[in-house]
Amino acid sequence: MFKAIKPVAQVALLIVGVAMVGFGIMRGEADAVLAKAIRLCLECIGIG
Amino acid sequence: MDKRKNTASHLLARFRGLIQAAATLATNIHLPNFAKGGIYQGAGKAVCVPGLNCYSCPAASGACPIGSFQSVVGSSKFSFSYYVTGTLILIGVLLGRFVCGFLCPFGWLQELLHKIPGKKLSTKKLKLLTYIKYAVLLFAVVLLPVLVVNDVGMGDPFFCKYICPQGVLEGAIPLSIMNTGIRSALGKLFTWKLAILIVVAVLSVLFYRPFCKWICPLGAFYALMNKVSLLGIQVDQCKCVSCGKCAKVCQMDVDVTRTPNHAECIRCGKCVGACPVDAISFRYGLGVTGDKPAQSTQACENK
């Protein structure tokens, strides 16, 4: 059963992944990631 | 050299160490920043790297997917990150836990530590601990940053702040060496995270990849994707002689002949090299990475 639907699931997940990335970029999430990543993450390095 | 050992699967497994080193370098390409005591601030930081790599590492070329997810969902503007989740789904479907075995800098570090000579302990009787990482993913990465918020609706990146040892190793230590301001600001939280790093390092000498097996939320996500990943392991049951060498050599405690696409399989390829009859190989593509069923004796003979 799983073998039969596996290729379908793989293609579906790839489409969902691409769509989610595109939607995330559209609503400004990539900018939010960039804004966080180019500043020193105080929590990450243990300052708080 | 034995000719049959030069298949793509064998070559991939044989050169894994080199690929891990190259992946670590590619993930941390801005090496001069170590001397400058600052971090890379270019547009590349908007893209998530596949492995666990702190974006506060001076050399980091991209963003940590776990840190990015928490920063987005912990902001007052968003409560879910389609961008990071979509990226992880894509990487998960394309590669699965191959990322852990070949591309993750922290996984590679644990492997190097495990090469230190000394007593080695098995994790076969500790399989229950592998479920901890799913709890870490659910609570520390997804739920707590969304649910525990301050007055302006912002949540802490709980995993990065209280659990992840990469931030101390790649960020705090090199930055505090070069930057007196950062050095003077380090306090109890740093001490706590340094203790975690030391414990993980010591455990890594004793056990094979303890952080990957038990704690890593990124490994947990890729583990969930392993069954649908395009890259997988296939066992040819017609060739298999059930010698058990593959299961014996597997340090992730997987019996590849029973579950080739087990959630814990990091695609390291040790089983590929151990198989005396070349029954195990890497496979890539739609639908071809599934568990190859045991064929009838007649079907094998006719092959």
Image: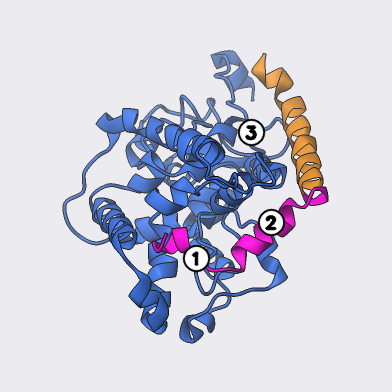
Chain colours: A orange, B blue
Q: Is residue B198 magenta?
A: no
Q: Secondary structure at mark 1?
A: helix
Q: Which span is picked out in magenta?
A: A25-48
Element type where label 3 sits in the image: loop
Given the image, on which type of amino acid does mark 3 rest?
Thr
Instruction: Please state the chain letter of the residue tagged with numbered disc 3 in the rendered image.
Output: B
In this view, the mark in front (2 or 3): 2
Give the labeled residue for mark 1: B18
Lateral position of residue B249 relative to residue B4, left or right: left
Q: Is residue B259 above or below residue B97?
A: above
For the point 50% across and 49% down, which residue is it? B157
Is the residue A25 above or below the residue A47 in the image? Answer: above
Give neighbour class at mark 1: few <14, some 14-19, many 20+ (Cα, 10 Å).
few
Depth check: give the residue in front, B227 or B291: B227
Labelled disc at residue A32: 2
Magenta-span inclusion, residue A26 = yes
**Residue B60 occupies which quadrant of the picture?**
bottom right
* Structural distance between the alpha carbons of marks 2 and 3: 36 Å
The residue at 50%/54% (across/down) is B52
Task: State which quadrant residue B40 falls in.
Answer: bottom right
Residue B46 found in image quarter: bottom right
Please state which amino acid type lies under the numbered disc 2. Answer: Ala
Secondary structure of residue under mark 2: helix
Mark carried by residue B289: 3
The reply to whether label 2 and label 3 mark residues of one chain is: no
Give the amino acid type for the residue marked by disc 1 in the picture: Leu
User: Does the CB distance between marks 2 and 3 fall below 8 Å?
Assistant: no
CA separation in Å, label 3 and label 1: 25 Å
Kindly check if marks 2 and 1 are in contact, taking CB atoms under 8 A apart as contact: no
Q: Chain of mark 1?
A: B
Q: CA distance from mark 2 to mark 1?
A: 34 Å
